[in-house]
Image (spheres, rainbow, N blue to C red):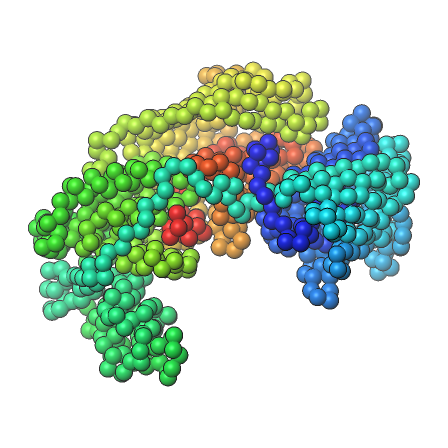
């Protein structure tokens, strides 16, 4: 949590200074009551609200433009028979109608969905801007009906709604009790006015609250005298609001709220190498390279087809890109060309004739692009109607040719990758035919070009693992250990290739390698890439310029490049911060430690990894012991903190490989995490061109000794799960489901949903339900919490793949607990996945 404070960035503020602020509950509101307003989409906030004998800490998150979430941790003095009573609650507010000129914002909210019910309340609220005033009025149930304003209207329809079990009381906690919502004999009325004063960033607040603090009054903790509250709100910074006022006629109240904007980088200007400026070829070189590439022929193609064979080396999306490139470079009259469905649309600078249309149709017929018609139009002038003509049917190729092309797709090379530039083609069986070298290529020193590429890529923080340049194409294997988003690395490497490769090279294939294993293949035609860089392409155009494929299994270029580069040592020494939250005796405990991590990559895919930790400072409370009736797989964490304050966090060997082009595999054995050691396997299937993946993992593990050295405790378990993942294109939402056997030998499923912003900041939640009854699980009923991932480069001005990761649980129990990093294969491949690259595709054009 401290990292979030450190990484705070300026929140959006309306030009007139009317940015909404937060109440003592951490929700967008007034002083103690909610409003219908919403914060900026994605906004994170950390709020501290205090009044007499009560302090509330709240984490707020604008999940969507219309949905606000808040998690709060409250302390109440001399309450519920405790010297200090700590309470956890989670709330949601949803906007039903957005404000218009004549109608208000209308929102519906629940303050305590999963909690003890102490703050249980539901409400409808409307807010309207009138001149310099924000006017709110709402109806509340539960605590917000404490002043008994009206009878509950739902009770007139269903008598069961007249009864509410926990009005400011306490239930077992951790469960969603639908039978409580909108229940109770009464309904309250609340509201208020915010005056946006002429003084910049200063607001005056007056509100009528409907919370009578009945339970606090009964325990003599707090006794309101009047429902009227007044106060001031001031924003000294765009991301900081301080609110203070006189509450309920008996107490001063104070709210401090720090907001963060995860949609924007804190440090947009980064230290380190800047991307190389795009260096496109001359028009003449570009046209010649495109023409030669599109019309390249192979001996086998000619024999099989019985005659001329033009452009058939491309299929599917590649064929479309090749055809569009050829049209764009065919004449100065062509402004732009694209394939829309099965129609080739050519935008020209003057009115064209049917003969011109037929010429483009013949070019389309000569390609293998799935185009059935051509439309030629002058879009700028908008004169006349498009000239439309059909594409003549090309003679079908023998099946042997298609079979040959399929085999060529299955190996590493394009049509002419089987030999280095200038080498004669091998016409023997099983070899891919290559083009004869062009005079231009004969004059190029390929070794010098490859050396230049390696040096330029290294200057960008990228390692070239293998490279081969042929007559018209280049294949380059690279490793990215610098940039958080792979699209950034792809964009930088593409600029390197534009600057360093000979002008006759038209096709570029970049293969991302992680730990010696190829993970993603990015195919680009150079002419569209040059236009993309020089014409300020938008994300849609950038996405159309690239093609992602699963890397081939046969990788002689990579094998040759890696033959002399192993073993490798990667190490780091860094400070770390650890926190334990929500202990009933000590709500916040922290540790500052130093971590020494090292990985020895023995061979491609084979590595030995360790992480040693040393304590610098901690204020842990080691007195609390677990009362869990389940095997103590997590609830003994205090024992590990006390006896293993310095120790071995991990020490294991791993082997990663691919079983198929899109199937990844990992075997791992050793001290896998702080509490368990053992061995197991993972497998992950990431189908080509999809946003989903399916994985499976299984581990046989034994509990480690408390000192985190080499000893063991007498508890063993076989754990594992089947995992399904989906990276959606909507709002950056990511979903995951893990179903299987957990460490406490219980069976069930974990559901995760997170929202990832373009900055890489990811916020979400998870919940695990198993066959352990809520009563046996203990306090909290089931495992649940928040997921927070903050890339370090979001806040600091340098590129790094490190991040601050926090799974924020209300409390730690034993049910539904998974082995740490049991699905690390997914995390390893996620950076180069289809969904991740296309979610950040703009960075390819503008790294």
Please name the residue shown 38% across and 74% down the image: 380
Front-lying residue, 508 or 115: 508
Relative to 794, residue 705 above or below = above
Q: Where residue 518 appears, x then y in whole percent? A: 31, 42
Please name the residue shown 57% across and 18% down the image: 617
Q: Where residue 804 appears, x then y in whole percent? A: 52, 34
Q: Where residue 182 appears, x then y in whole percent? A: 79, 52
Please name the residue shown 53% across and 43% down the image: 762
Left or right of 701 on screen, residue 487? left
Please name the residue shown 68% across and 32% down the image: 778
Residue 580 in sight from this viewpoint: yes
Front-lying residue, 206 or 489: 206
- In this view, the residue farthest toward the right is 225
Q: Where residue 790 appears, x then y in whole percent? A: 52, 38
Front-lying residue, 712 or 272: 272
Front-lying residue, 632 or 188: 188
Q: How many marks?
A: 0
Q: Quarter holding the N terminus?
A: top right
């Amino acid at each position: 949590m401290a990292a979030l404070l450190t990484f705070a960035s300026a929140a959006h503020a309306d030009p007139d200074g009317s940015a909404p602020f937060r109440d003592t509950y951490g929700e967008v509101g007034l002083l103690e009551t909610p409003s219908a307003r919403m914060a900026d989409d994605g906004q994170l906030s950390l709020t501290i609200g205090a009044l007499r004998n009560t302090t509330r800490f709240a984490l707020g998150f604008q999940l969507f433009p219309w949905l606000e979430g808040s998690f709060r941790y409250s302390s109440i003095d001399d309450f519920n028979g405790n010297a200090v009573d700590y309470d956890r609650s989670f709330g949601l507010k949803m906007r039903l109608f957005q404000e218009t000129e004549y109608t208000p914002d209308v929102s519906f909210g629940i303050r305590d969905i999963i909690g003890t019910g102490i703050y249980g309340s539901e409400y409808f609220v409307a807010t309207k801007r009138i001149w310099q005033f924000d006017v709110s009025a709402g109806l509340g149930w539960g605590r917000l009906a404490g002043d008994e304003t009206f009878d509950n209207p739902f009770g007139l329809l269903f008598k069961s709604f007249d009864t509410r079990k926990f009005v400011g009381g306490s239930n077992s906690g951790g469960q969603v009790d639908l039978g409580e919502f909108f229940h109770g004999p009464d309904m309250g009325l609340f509201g208020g006015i915010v005056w946006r004063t002429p003084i910049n960033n200063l607001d005056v607040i007056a509100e009528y609250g409907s919370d009578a603090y009945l339970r606090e009054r009964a325990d003599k903790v707090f006794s309101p005298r009047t429902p009227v509250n007044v106060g001031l709100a001031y924003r000294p910074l765009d991301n900081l609001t301080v609110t203070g006022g006189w509450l309920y006629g008996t107490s001063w109240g104070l709210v401090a709220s720090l907001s963060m904007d995860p949609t924007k980088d804190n440090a947009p200007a980064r230290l380190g190498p800047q991307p190389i400026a795009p260096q496109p070829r001359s028009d003449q070189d570009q046209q010649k390279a495109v023409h030669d590439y599109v019309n390249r022929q192979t001996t086998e193609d000619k024999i099989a087809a019985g005659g001329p064979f033009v452009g058939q080396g491309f299929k599917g999306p590649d064929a479309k890109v090749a055809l569009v490139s050829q049209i764009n470079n065919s004449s100065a009259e062509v402004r732009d060309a694209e394939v829309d469905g099965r129609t080739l649309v050519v935008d020209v600078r003057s009115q064209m004739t049917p003969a011109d249309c037929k010429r483009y149709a013949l070019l389309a017929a000569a390609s293998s692009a799935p185009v059935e018609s051509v439309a030629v139009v002058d879009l700028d002038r908008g004169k006349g109607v498009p000239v439309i003509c059909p594409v003549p049917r090309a003679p079908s190729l023998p099946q042997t040719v298609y079979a040959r092309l399929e085999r060529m797709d299955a190996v590493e090379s394009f049509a002419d990758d089987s030999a280095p530039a200038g080498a004669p083609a091998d016409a023997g069986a099983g070899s891919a035919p290559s083009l004869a070298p062009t005079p231009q290529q004969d004059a190029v020193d390929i070794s010098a070009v490859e050396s230049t590429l390696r040096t330029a890529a290294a200057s960008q923080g990228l390692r070239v693992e293998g490279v081969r340049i042929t007559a018209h194409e280049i294949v380059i294997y690279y490793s990215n250990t610098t940039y958080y988003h792979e699209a950034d690395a792809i964009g930088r490497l593409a600029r390197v290739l534009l600057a360093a490769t000979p002008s006759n090279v038209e096709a570029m294939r970049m293969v991302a390698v992680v730990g010696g294993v190829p993970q993603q293949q990015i195919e680009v035609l150079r002419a569209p890439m040059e236009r993309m860089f020089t014409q300020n392409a938008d994300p849609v155009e950038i996405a159309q310029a690239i093609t992602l494929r699963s890397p081939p299994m046969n990788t002689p270029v990579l094998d040759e490049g890696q033959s002399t580069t192993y073993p490798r040592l990667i190490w780091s020494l860094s400070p770390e911060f650890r926190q334990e939250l929500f202990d009933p005796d000590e709500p916040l405990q922290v540790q500052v430690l130093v971590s020494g991590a090292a990985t020895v990559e023995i061979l491609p895919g084979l590595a030995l990894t360790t992480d040693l930790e040393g304590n610098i400072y901690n204020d842990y409370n080691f007195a609390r012991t677990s009362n869990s009736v389940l095997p103590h797989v997590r609830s003994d964490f205090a024992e590990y903190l006390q006896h293993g304050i310095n120790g071995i966090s991990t020490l294991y060997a791993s082997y990663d490989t691919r079983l198929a082009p899109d199937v990844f595999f990992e075997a791992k054995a050793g001290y896998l995490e702080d509490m368990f050691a053992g061995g197991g396997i993972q497998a992950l299937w990431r189908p080509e061109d999809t946003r989903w993946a399916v994985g499976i993992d299984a581990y046989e593990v034994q509990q480690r000794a408390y000192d985190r050295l080499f000893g063991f405790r007498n508890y063993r378990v076989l754990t594992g799960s089947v995992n399904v993942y989906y990276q959606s294109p909507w709002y950056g939402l990511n979903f995951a489901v893990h179903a299987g056997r957990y460490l406490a030998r219980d069976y069930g499923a974990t559901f995760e949903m997170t929202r990832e912003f373009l900055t890489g900041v990811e916020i979400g939640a998870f919940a695990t339900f198993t066959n352990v009854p809520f009563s046996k699980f203990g306090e909290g009923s089931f495992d649940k919490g928040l997921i927070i991932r903050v890339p370090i480069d979001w806040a600091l001005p340098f590129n790094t793949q490190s991040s601050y990761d926090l799974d924020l649980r209300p409390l730690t129990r034993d049910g539904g607990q998974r082995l740490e990093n049991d699905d690390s294969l997914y995390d390893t491949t996620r950076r180069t996945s289809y969904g991740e690259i296309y979610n950040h595709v703009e960075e390819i054009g503008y790294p």
